[in-house]
Image (cartoon, rainbow, N blue to C red):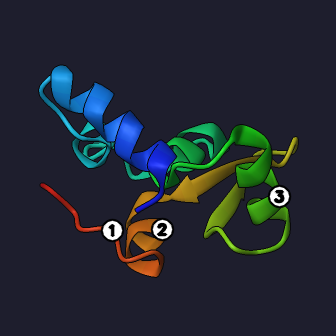
Amino acid sequence: MCLRTMRTNQIANKKGRTMQTKFADRPLLSITEAGELLGVSVSTAYRMADAGQLPIIRLGDGGRMRVVRAQLMEQYGIADSE
């Protein structure tokens, strides 16, 4: 686990939840939220999406990107805490 993820989880734990439980009820995440879950910056998350390293779907005519949470967690070996 990277240092940023550990720090983010520490903050979330103070609020009584982990990053996994924060997004547990949502099947789709924004690129920003996926980056937060992975512990990477927003720009890195967008680069990962552009490189095909995130399981994204495009919504609407504008092509708004969303990350499929279940596939992301499986792809990166993140335990689901539901």
| Residue annotated with mark 2 | 72
- Residue type at tag 2: Leu
The residue located at (40%, 62%) in the rendering is: 1
Q: CA distance from mark 1 to mark 2?
A: 8 Å
Q: Residues within 10 Å of mark 2 (few under 14, many from 20)?
A: many
Q: Are marks 1 and 2 in contact (CB under 8 Å)?
A: yes
The residue located at (63%, 38%) in the rendering is: 32
Q: Kindly identify which numbered label has been placed on residue 78.
A: 1
Q: CA distance from mark 3 to mark 1?
A: 20 Å
| Residue annotated with mark 3 | 47
Q: Is residue 59 visible?
A: no
First in residue order: circle 1 vs circle 2? 2
Residue 79, compared with residue 23, is above or below; it is: below
| Image location (x, y in percent) of residue 38 | 50, 55
- Residue type at tag 3: Arg
Q: Quadrant of the C terminus?
A: bottom left
